[in-house]
Image: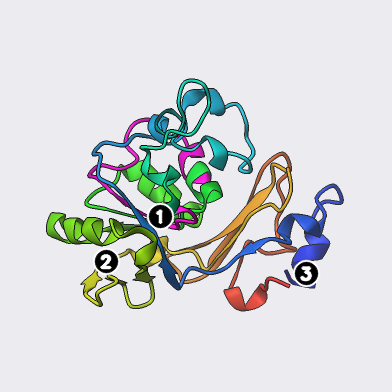
Amino acid sequence: ITSRLRSSLPTTASCKIFSFCREKFEKLTAIAAPMALINIDTDMIIPKQFLKTIKRSGLGVSAFHEMRYNLDGTDNPDFVLNKDAYKGVNILVAGDNFGCGSSREHAPWALLNFGIRCVISTSFADIFYNNCFKNGILPVIVTEDELQLLMKDAGKGSNARIVVDLDNQGVETSDGEVITFDVDQHMIGGAIFQPSSDTSYHAIFSLRAAGTTALRAVGTTSFRAAGTTTFTLADADCK
């Protein structure tokens, strides 16, 4: 963060807030988990009893709670994300209409906190789709045939890695087959910042139509960069 921006922060919000800078999404090589169920809604991603918090941290343990845990709180061994082959998963290959239901932003928070950086499906609910970009998750839309190919590849578990290349807008299977996808360039953030501790502050850089980035502070205190509301990514760093 530049000295200009640092000096404009309120004293109650130290620069420790920005000490965790999420790496810019360019290329992700990771294990993918198949989740073929259609219409996975935001309540299935993060049930309503976990929505009391306004903090982003700590929601990953409750992601997919009703499918992930038995009634006694033990892990459900039949749930895909509990299987040893999908430990450390960063990509979900999901059924149609992923993220439908209510507009709760806690859903992408929970996914990101769990470790998910990319969700691939044939379609997404509009609000969830937009919230993914705001929170550092890349939603990729593919055709039904392409989804089935990726589902099969994800079925290999830790024996395979899927590559998601945002710059070239392609998904490469473990067998080397490349699936292209489109993404609105105005939806791609230049950098995403998240709090490193239990604080309600967070700031994101989001790409505007003019090609610049606007700093938005969200939380109990808001602030503006000294004397300006827009600046390019060249003005910011993660040091």
Percent x, y for residue 227?
72, 63
**Earlier residue among tags 3 and 2:** 3
**Residue at figure coordinates x 69%, y 46% from the top left:** 201
Amino acid at the residue labelled 3: Arg
Assign a secondary structure to mark 3: helix
Q: Which residue is mark 1?
A: 85
Q: Which mark is residue 182?
A: 2
Percent position of residue 9, x then y: 79, 56
Q: Nearer the viewer, mark 1 or mark 3?
A: 1
Label 1: how many residues lie within 10 Å, few (<14), some (14-19) or many (20+)?
Answer: some
Q: CA distance from mark 2 to mark 1?
A: 30 Å
Q: What secondary structure is the stretch in magenta mostly built from? A: loop
Q: Which residue was labeled with disc 3?
A: 4
Magenta-drawn stretch contains 236: no
Residue sitting at x 25%, y 67%? 181
**Position of residue 89 in the picture relative to residue 205 (left or right):** left
Front in this rendered view, residue 151 or 187 = 151
The amino acid beneath tag 1 is: Ala
104 drawn magenta: yes
The magenta stretch is 87-109
Q: Measure the C-alpha gap from mark 1 to mark 3.
A: 47 Å
Residue 12, placed above or below residue 50 = below
Q: Earlier in the sequence, mark 1 or mark 3?
A: 3
Residue 235 horizontal/vertical position (percent):
66, 75
Q: Spatial distance from mark 3 to mark 2, Cα to Cα?
A: 36 Å
Q: Is residue 140 left or right of residue 30?
A: left
Direction from residue 25 to residue 16 in the image, left or right: right
